[in-house]
Image (cartoon, grey):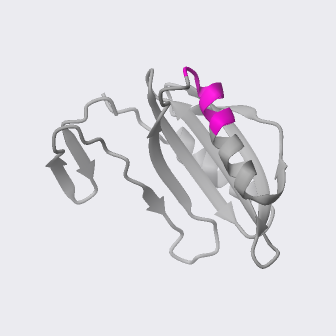
Amino acid sequence: MSDNSYCIIKEGQFRLPENFVDRSINVIADMTASRPSINISRDTLGANTSSLEDYLNQQLSILTSKLTGWHEKPRKPVYLGATAVPGEEITYNFLRQPNQRMWQKQAVFLMNKIDVLIFTMSKLDAFNEQDDALLNEVLQSFILKE
């Protein structure tokens, strides 16, 4: 992600204008809509963060201040692809209006010293073993761009 001269998408690629960076979001969805979709997004650590833990703490602080009924499970280590890029998995739920609970699971990775890659799975009920296996399948199949 540190090579910002081109943005590569499924349909092709294009040159990024000067001082632009790719912050695209990819969504992969089950064609039968029976399993949760997975969003892949990109971010950077930012000026006030120097580690993945700092980044996560900052982002979760922003989220928890804006959402009600927040419940978070303990973070756990997770690995991306055959190269086993280390990251953290965060699972939480919160209330959406009107009183509808949303569950989210994120696998967050620091890809170099500043770029963050985030895999997010969301659904309207608690995650089950099949959901966990789905996210793990996607993470384990990841091939790092050379």
Q: Position of residue 78 (x, y in %)?
A: 66, 33
Q: Nearer the viewer, residue 65 or 84?
A: 65
Above-or-below relation of 5 to 85: below
Residue at screen point 69% across, 34% down: 57
Q: Which residues are magenta?
A: 50-58
Q: Position of residue 52 (x, y in %)?
A: 59, 27
Image quadrant holding the C terminus, namely top left
Q: Position of residue 30 (x, y in %)?
A: 54, 69
Above-or-below relation of 108 to 12: above
Q: Quadrant of residue 130?
A: bottom right
Q: Quadrant of residue 86?
A: top right
Residue at screen point 58% across, 47% down: 137
Membership of 113 in magenta stretch: no
Q: Nearer the viewer, residue 128 or 52?
A: 52
Q: Is residue 128 visible?
A: no
Residue at screen point 24% across, 46% down: 7
